[in-house]
Image (cartoon, rainbow, N blue to C red):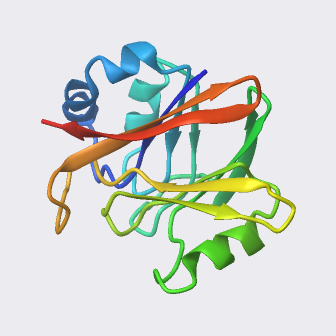
């Protein structure tokens, strides 16, 4: 199963095609799309859902968009959690572990900076903590990005960031 992770798209009404064009072939391989907030217009979710089921959360710039602030779902035996703002980078791993103690994957956004870390609990449970970066507004990031997570038999086998045009 392939998860396509995106966040911080900041697109208005009628602009979803900008995102779809940037994601290109990534959409063809996505079994599930995860959007970690700052969608800003619900039409973006509608456009994405034409390619794969979408799980999304509310971001700090989302107005009039009815989504939960946090969401947890199951993807091929893995627990996936989503939150927009993970708080300051100092203490992030422990904070995300506290918020989502059993999640195998935690997707977050807000900073527009792509990142990937693992947190390994004493019992060996690995939590993959991923900010896909922004597909639209790179801000201080070197490039626009999304992320892909491949899951096989209930385990994360690949996490990679993908540079976008």
In the picture, measured across the screen, residue 68 lies left or right of residue 122, that is: left
Relative to 67, say whether 54 is above or below: above
Q: How many marks?
A: 0
Q: Is residue 47 visible?
A: yes
Residue at the spot x=69%, y=52% of the render?
A: 71
Relative to 83, say whether 36 is above or below: above
In the picture, measured across the screen, residue 2 lies left or right of residue 39, that is: right
Q: Residue furthest right?
A: 123
Residue nearest the viewer, comparing 109 with 50: 109
Residue nearest the viewer, comparing 146 with 136: 146
Relative to 92, say whether 21 is above or below: above
Residue nearest the viewer, comparing 165 with 120: 120
Residue 158 in the image: state x and y as whole percent.
52, 34
| Quadrant in the rendering for residue 109 | bottom left
**Quarter of the picture holding the C terminus:** top left
Residue at the spot x=80%, y=31% of the render?
A: 77
Residue 162 in the image: state x and y as whole percent.
29, 38
Residue at the spot x=25%, y=21% of the render?
A: 24
Residue 141 in the image: state x and y as whole percent.
20, 62
**Quarter of the picture holding the N terminus:** top right
Residue 72 in the image: state x and y as whole percent.
73, 49
């Amino acid at each position: 199963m392939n998860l396509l992770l995106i966040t911080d798209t900041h697109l208005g009404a009628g602009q979803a095609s900008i995102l779809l064009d940037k994601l290109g072939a990534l959409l063809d391989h996505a079994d599930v799309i995860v959007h970690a907030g700052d969608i800003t217009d619900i039409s973006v979710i509608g456009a994405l859902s034409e390619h794969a089921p979408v799980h999304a959360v509310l971001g700090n710039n989302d107005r009039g968009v009815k989504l939960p602030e946090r969401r947890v779902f199951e993807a091929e035996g893995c627990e996936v959690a989503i939150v927009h703002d993970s708080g300051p980078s100092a203490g992030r791993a422990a904070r995300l572990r506290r918020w989502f103690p059993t999640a195998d994957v935690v997707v977050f956004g807000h900073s527009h900076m792509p990142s990937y870390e693992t947190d390994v609990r004493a019992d060996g449970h690995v939590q993959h903590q991923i900010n896909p970066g922004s597909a639209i507004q790179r801000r201080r990031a070197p490039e626009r990005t999304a992320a892909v997570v491949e899951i096989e038999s209930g385990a994360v086998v690949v996490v990679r960031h993908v540079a976008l045009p």
